[in-house]
Amino acid sequence: MTESHTKVLVVDDQFLIRAGLVGVLRAAPGIEVVGEAGDGAEAVELAAETRPDVILMDIRMPGMNGITATERILAAASEPQPRVLVLTTFDLDEYVYGALRAGAAGFLLKDSGPERLLAAVAAVASGDALFAPSVTRRLVEAFAVRSGAAPAPAGAPPADLAALTGRELEVLKLIAQGLSNAEIADRLYISEATVKTHLNRTMNKLDLDTRAQAVVIAYETGLVIPGGTNI
């Protein structure tokens, strides 16, 4: 096994779905399935044992659900942490929102085809923290309002974001609105590399692990208002 292989752990309580995912992954070059788990508790054990690069995590399971399993796996993992890609049957799912808050890198609908599955695994394995920015923005916007976050006062950043520079706040706001790095670079007249630098500094200052967590905090602090124009 060469270093170029991506090690994947598959977690789903439904055997046929799990078997289908494993079959697609094993047929793809550059991917090694290192384990299968039928529930969250087994996923935590196998993640510690196999140290996968990517975990396909079913979100709704009896016993320990995917949110709790994600939290425990990431809390116990040494660097580099595995990238958790949540599996769900429908996109506007508050369980998925909870998983993104907990540090999942993104999510994938279970009815996605093999090409979408492999593209998602490749994306998160390469460090892309969000697979579907616009869809994730819709999900976060739908549920962030439940946290009761108040809009930030005009002209002042939210207190939780006070450590960020003006440009970092701009980048964070555009990320939360579902723009890609290329779109942000075009909007702000800067390079994609500069966008990545601002994002990395933002995530370090806020102690975030994924781009999805950055989207969540932008809404929950009131930097971006659910349903607002956010210009």
Image (cartoon, rainbow, N blue to C red):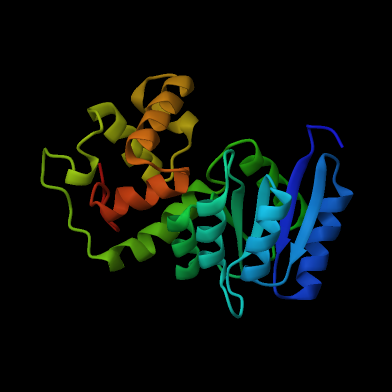
Closest to the observer: 160 or 47? Answer: 47
Residue 176 visible in the current orientation: yes
Can you say whether 217 is above or below 23 in the image? above
Closest to the observer: 143 or 56? Answer: 56
Q: On the rendered structure, is 195 left or right of 146?
A: right
Image location (x, y in percent) of residue 146: 29, 68
Q: On the rendered structure, is 181 left or right of 226?
A: right
Closest to the observer: 99 or 51? Answer: 51
Can you say whether 122 is above or below 97 in the image? above
Q: Quadrant of the N terminus?
A: top right
* Tally of marks: 0
Can you say whether 146 is above or below 195 in the image? below
Residue 104 visible in the current orientation: no
- Residue in view at x 59 percent, y 38 percent: 80
Image location (x, y in percent) of residue 210: 48, 44
Image location (x, y in percent) of residue 166: 23, 29
Q: In which quarter of the image is the C terminus?
A: top left
- Which quadrant of the figure has residue 160? top left
- Residue in view at x 83 percent, y 55 percent: 24
Image location (x, y in percent) of residue 119: 70, 45
- Residue in view at x 38 percent, y 34 percent: 204
- Residue in view at x 25 percent, y 51 percent: 221
